[in-house]
Amino acid sequence: MRAFGKAHGFTVMTHVVRPSMASTFQVKVLSGRALPSFPGTQGDCSTDLKIAPQRAFRRKLFRQLSQRGLAEPVTCLGTRYDESVRRATGMRLRGESDDTAARNKDGDLVLSPIAHWSDDDVWEAIALYGSGSRPCFSDFEEMRRIYAHSVGRSCAVVADAILDGGTARKQGKCGARMGCHVCQMAEDKSLSNMIAFDERYAYARGLHRLNRFIRATRHDWSRRHWIGRTIRGGYVKVQPDTYHPAMLRALTRYMLQLDYDEQQRVASVGERPKFQLLPLDMMVAVDALQSLNGVARPFAAWADLRDIHERGIRYDVPEVLEVAPTPIPAPRFLHVGDAWDDSAPDSDWTGLRDPMREALTEGSACEPAITVGADGRAILDLPTSQQFGVDLEAAHLIAEFEVERLLDMHDACSAPGSVTAGYRWYAQYGCLTLSHSQKAEHDDIARRTAFKDRLGLTDNYDLRSVLAQSVSFEDLPQAGRAGWSGLGSEQTQLALC
């Protein structure tokens, strides 16, 4: 594209934007913070992975252009009225045009050059540009290949005709959905067609199996985490929410296994890996946050990696029958006290602080920095930046020199309340960088997790025992009923999960 621009007298500058690590599917889901975006729920993934990073970069770029006194920029989009009824309605509401720039909800000027093109217009243009009849930067061969193979055909135009003749367009959906390998918003028939059509896509079989597993287990309440995070009137809610620690451990293992299999495949054929689901920095982030949230014992990811790479243990994605939708179980409530630290005689130390380290390093250059939060609590002063991240150099040093020690700590028996030790270790090693607001937030989460761990409510809790100790809404004392009186709206939202 830069060469094409230079040949035709205009400048092309290319910038690639990436989502923050905390917004990725792996970190959001495997840390226990969120579920995948399922049909009927908000498509947070589209916002997190595409819209938010593009918007942030665009604003930064526009500020720079404004400071240089340049004319207001116009963003060109490839949206078309002919794509679907839903797309056309949205475009009309925004006043999108192919010849006049309109302002979007962010106040930016937007132009849609092919707004009134039909599907035939698009394919005619691709043919003219691809053949060299019109000047262009690409022959579009790769685009045509993927589009054709997504329907199991060798011709992209025929493939589009097949899709256009089906129900996909009438329903306002994309028939050949070529998106993220874990996307749950629509069934990814395109990837299964590609795998069946050409052996070149064999590398994606495991990815597709993972997608089907996540889809099939959506309504399996036994794979959900039942212990709530919010105390109201001394009680937490007991009801399926995000994934259960056992499910998170399984998903982490499946991804590490798929990465290992891909590494083995490329070693035998002499090519670069097609994917890596959990690169080192992301694996460290997942391992740290699983410890912080109490959904895995410290350094569990390193233990799983050892199983796969050294012990020959396999964690293959299973083929399971799809669980039929059923109503979400009615909520019950477990008494835990008015605050997470009620049961801790040493509550000043239940967050991110380490009393042993502070005692051993007091008065020395190695003494950890302590800051005081808005609530007056002393918390560990961790390095901060604009967003959560992992120092890649520190992660490589850990992989090179510290793994045996981490595995020893994982294999040792852990005392109740110590599940957050893994997160603290990464933080004290200088491996983690938090956003400015996360310092106090993560201290609060660590205190909550340590409390739940002392009660046996973290990674390996007995759900039957928890349910036996819990009570229904009707049996709550007055303070508990008052605290959870707004349950109706929350119940409606959870029923969509």
Image (cartoon, rainbow, N blue to C red):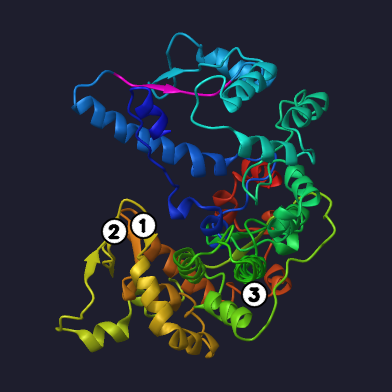
Mark 3 is surrounded, within 10 Å at the Cα level, by few (under 14), some (14 to 19) or many (20 or more) other residues, namely some
Q: Is residue 392 magenta?
A: no
Image mark for residue 384: 2
Sequence-earlier tag: 1 or 3:
1
Sequence-earlier tag: 2 or 1:
2
How many numbered circles does the render carry? 3
Image mark for residue 461: 3
Separation of marks 3 and 2 at Cα, in angstroms: 33 Å
Dot 3 amino acid type = Tyr
Task: Work out whether 271 lies above or below 419.
Answer: above
Task: Work out whether 274 lies above or below 254.
Answer: above
Residue lying at 56% horizontally and 53% vertically, measured from the top left:
25
Give the extent of the magenta segment. Answer: 72-79
Of 333 and 206, nearer the camera is 206
Where does label 1 land, which residue? 438
Separation of marks 1 and 3 at Cα, in angstroms: 27 Å
Based on the displayed image, in which of its 4 quarters is residue 151 positioned?
Answer: top right
Dot 2 amino acid type = Thr
Question: Residue 428, image x and y in percent?
Answer: 32, 75
Mark 2 is surrounded, within 10 Å at the Cα level, by few (under 14), some (14 to 19) or many (20 or more) other residues, namely some
476 sits left or right of 410 in the view? right
Quarter of the figure that contains the N terminus? top left
